[in-house]
Image (spheres, coloured by chain):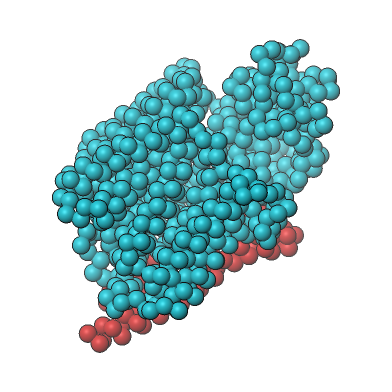
Chain colours: A red, B cyan
Amino acid sequence: MDNKQEHATAYWKENLKYLVILLSIWFIVSFGFGIIFREALNEFRLGGFKLGFWFAQQGSIYVFVILIIVYIRLMNKLDKKYGFDE
Amino acid sequence: MSVQFWTWLLVGISFALYFGIAIWARAGSTKEFYVAGGGVSPLANGMATAADWMSAASFISMAGIISFAGYDGSVYLMGWTGGYVLLALLLAPYLRKFGKFTVPDFIGDRYYSNTARTVAVFCALIVSFTYVAGQMRGVGIVFSQFLQVDINLGVLIGMTVVLIFSLLGGMKGITYTQVAQYCVLIFAFMVPAFFISLQMTGNIIPQIGMGGKVEGGAFLLDKLDALHTQLGFNEYTSGTKSTWDVFAITLALMTGTAGLPHVIVRFFTVPKVKDARKSAGYALFLIAILYTTAPAISVFSRTNLIETVSETKYSEIPQWFKNWEDTGLISWTDKNGDGKIQYVAGNALDGKKPIFTEDRGTYGERLISNASASAKNELYVDRDIMVLANPEIANLPNWVIGLVAAGGLAAALSTAAGLLLVISTSVSHDLIKKQWRPNISDKGELRAARIAIFVAILIAGYFGINPPGFVAAVVALAFGLAAASFFPAIILGIFDKRMNSKGAVSGMIIGIVLMLFYMMKFKLDMFGGGTSEDWWFGTSPEGFGTIAMCVNIVISFVVSRLTAAPPQDVQDMVESIRIPSGAGEASDH
């Protein structure tokens, strides 16, 4: 039982670490690149897009999808590591 | 073959499909009725979530709004997709592990309090009713635009269709019809987008075409910016809202999305925690297809519109212009008497909508009585027509136009059904079963749920036929409310073990009241009203959910630390929802 409790605590800690990293990226691409720093990024171009505008209307959404996919992978591994998978 | 023929045919086929599924997926127990038996595959759940989420507003209005707002429209794109990251990482897996039927269930159990449960039910009902009225209206509009049916008759047809598949199948019927509706709506949205992208930029993928070059070698977006500057509008890619307001609105929409009960409840329908994560991934991917295409459509249609109408003689204008003028969604007044359309910055009208007189002008245009004398702009265009008129503007074949009608209906019906289910569950489960009559049998509860859905449809239909003037204003309120109430309560319930009932309840109540007050003050002109000059910290009512949410969190935190810790069994429950194994099936006990 104690062993299980330790596993649960360690599992939760690693989970929180993943959340902090992934949500930081989530924040940077949308609120950072798409909103706060858009003027500066608009100096650069991605084909016909100004970069800040691209992040706001396209790029951030692509990154969101990738973030969830990465999260699913990481958590499936984490479940296995601590024996919480089913 | 005519547009009418194709529209009836495609709408007819799609409706027949929904009925077939409804009959196949009848629900026999409350568990099937509330959470589809808990056995939906992640992909199917992802598709159902996507259809549930993408409403008439996403399908019909969003591209049009962005088309007129340019960069400012980004708040919807990021706000309504970024919320899914929060949902997938912070909510869905834990709520699935918790394994009950509804959001008030979670709030009530986690905060061991019927007050908390009641507050949650109240929020769920407000949010859902606000939303569903708009959907019913959307159904009516699609019917009247495409099938020349009276708008009220359109609402009645929509009500009947939703009634049949939700009454028979509950969540099970709704889930599988939503899967079909997702396919219809995404196909209908993408086909015209492919056509137009190819026509304008030579690239069939709209997401790439948007950044591509047009005839003559200039980039499309640069050309649009130049057109905008030339006509006195703000640059398309720059926008007019302040950076803080864009920030606040985006965050309020994201957290509001993650707190919407009809979206959250979808994650109770999959078998395991792992599947909840996976279906959130599928859902966002499937939503992103539409949400990355919409801004491209906005750019294409905006450029098309300006190029077609600007400085064009009314007598040489294409037929679609006159068709939409007949329905009252376009108006033109020849202010300088040159017979050409001047489309420049400024409001062409005094007021928001044109008021038509019965007469026609020199060129056969419909005359209006409220043309603005001060503005040079002669053209009024309703934002909603951008998606609906796009196929006509781009001269696409008739079957594409019919397809768009079927897609708009699929989007509106699927969202309405999901919301109605939340309403009926709130009444039959959270109020009747959990509070008023705990001893009610499964059969009795199922009957109550069906009666509740029937009543809810009647109310929604009433609002669809007699839309209250404030519907548009309160749709934004729905997100702000969810952000100010549910979102912090759920997140803190999972991530802060020390959070107790007093903290969460006071946070929720103060959050909602603050949000309601701000919206009433600045949207409905109550409590002394006010203009954008008076906004607190320069925050628009749409973005105020962000502030109300922060207030909620601070109050919850302070109050919880000043009062007793939650009982041990609740703390154990929090421990248990944090690990994924042993989720079992969504159940009542």
Rendered residue at 40%/80% (across/down):
A13
Above-or-below relation of A76 to B276: below
- Tell me residue B220's x, y (percent): 69, 43
Residue B581: image quadrant is bottom left
- Tell me residue B254's x, y (percent): 52, 57
Q: Residue furthest front?
A: B527
Rendered residue at 41%/70% (across/down):
B502
Answer with left or right where residue B400 lies relative to residue B246: left
Above-or-below relation of B4 to A68: above
Rendered residue at 55%/58% (across/down):
B514
Q: Residue furthest bottom?
A: A2
Above-or-below relation of B115 to B219: below
Number of marks: 0
Q: Does residue B318 appear in this view? A: no
- Tell me residue B92's x, y (percent): 37, 61
Rendered residue at 34%/31% (across/down):
B161
Answer with left or right where residue B564 lies relative to residue B228: left
Which sits in the foreground, B61 or B570? B570
